[in-house]
Amino acid sequence: MVVVKGARSTGSQMLVEKALELLGGTEKLVPREAAILVKPNVGFYEKDATTDPQLTAAVVKALKRAKPIRIVVGESSVRGYDTDHALEATEMRSVVEEAGAEVKNLRKDPIVRVEIPEGRAITSVSVFKTVHDSSYIVSVPRLKRHSATVTTISLKNMMGTLPDNEKGRFHQVDLSQCIADLNSAVRPNLVIIDGTRVMTKSGPTGGVMVDLNMVVASLDPVAADVVAAEELFKAEGVADPRRSITSIEHIQRAAELGVGVADRSKIEVLEVTLA
Amino acid sequence: MNRREFLRVFGVGIGVIALFDMFPRIIRRRNLVRPPGSVVEEAFNAVCIRCARCIQVCPTGAIVIADMSDGFKELGTPKIDPLRGPCERIQGRCDQKAKCAEVCPTGAIRPIDRRAAKTGSAIINADRCIAWRGGSCLVCYEVCPVQGAISLMDESRPIFHADICVGCGRCVYACPAQPKALTLTSEGERRLWPD
């Protein structure tokens, strides 16, 4: 678990490179000949509400050094938002294609059923074929508040791998438990959280943007969400950030399923500030 | 057939057509939601030539063809069905220029300033709403592009404000409840006058 902070002038490329270097480097982290899926948050048309394309491109460039058989940057936007338009309006498509990765509108993919043996609310889930066919998943969310789940970070970000009717089902059944169940079966292998500009006070759109110039990176999506949420709450001036995190249900339920560690006292963080 | 019989058949025929015209509106009990920048309803059905260009060009597929159940006078004219897609005049692919207004050859749909566009208002049936029934859902609030159109009671249940809502229908489209908890009505719509 690493937290890399910088100034506004540091830039996402340096933050991402440092974070991955501290985790051991992509050549060590990523298995050989991996079929990588990079899953940024491109849920909406607005740049504030979505992962920074330059940061995503930096992740792609670093992953290329692991010599994967392919890297796909994929997303299926929030229902009611067109994924192709979101990829265009946020410039995610143009910036990532220039960095040399394929950009995919997952909503056009065929659908595959995946079993969730440990699932408590759901025991199987439909995901897009590209997700199922990927051997290494990198969740690259933007750090934001969320009206229904308190925060939306690397765990909630995985909802972009679901077809529309499956997203709807999550809300019908039990949103927080379903997010946890999903991540127990479709687990991100690596998490790089875009904390360059974060959405405070309210979200997933319309919140107050704050420049934190930060990247949180980890192999544990639960721990990453816990540490990133703490940084978000600190930026808001919340009285007891660590206590607030215990109320984030989907994070707690994911920990209960063994997706990762939510107990802050057991999470070791290496924090580095770049001059 | 003599004249009396002819007049009787003719009279019955007129009656049937009038019934076909009135009946859908009686059972529908709601006016159609029209594309943004549509002229007033009295003129719309007369000005629209049912060319369907607006339907072809709408990027979200929100504009569909009104059928017999929508009324005889309305048959073949365009209406917005949020279950097919939202209207993106306020936010999205038509936020610079409404594509429907751009292609309409008769001016049944005209360019309207983004800040003035209002196709109607969304209304909620709380009995069907997942949040109002105690579940975890705020999708309508999350997808709404207009600050203040939906507010939250106790941070968990949505309240709809028709005076701020622009009627884009994104909330209706995205609502995961089955059956849907939201409906798009023409309430508060802004229409233009023909020349």
Image (cartoon, rainbow, N blue to C red):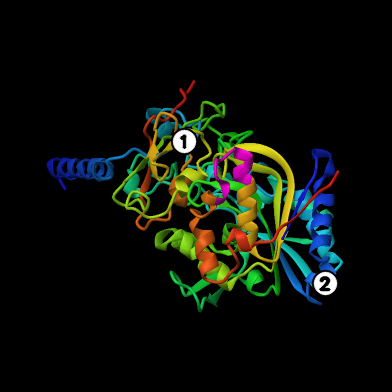
Magenta segment, prevailing SS (helix, strand or loop)? helix
* Image spot of residue A82 (x, y percent): 60, 51
Residue at the spot x=84%, y=47% of the render?
A: A274
Badge 2 sits on which subunit? Answer: A
Q: Is residue A230 magenta?
A: no
Q: Is residue A91 left or right of residue B67?
A: right
Residue B48: mark in rendering: 1
A238 inside magenta stretch: yes
Q: Amino acid at mark 1?
A: Cys
Of the residues tagged 2 and 1, which is closer to the observer? Answer: 2
Of all residues shown, which one is farthest toward the top?
B195
Q: Which residue is mark 2?
A: A28
**Range drawn in magenta:** A232-242
Question: A145 or A88, which is in the foreground?
Answer: A145
Query: What residue is rendered at 64% in x and 33% in y?
Result: B96
Q: Quadrant of residue B42?
A: top left
Q: Which mark is residue B113?
A: none
Could one spot residue A97 in this view of the protein?
no
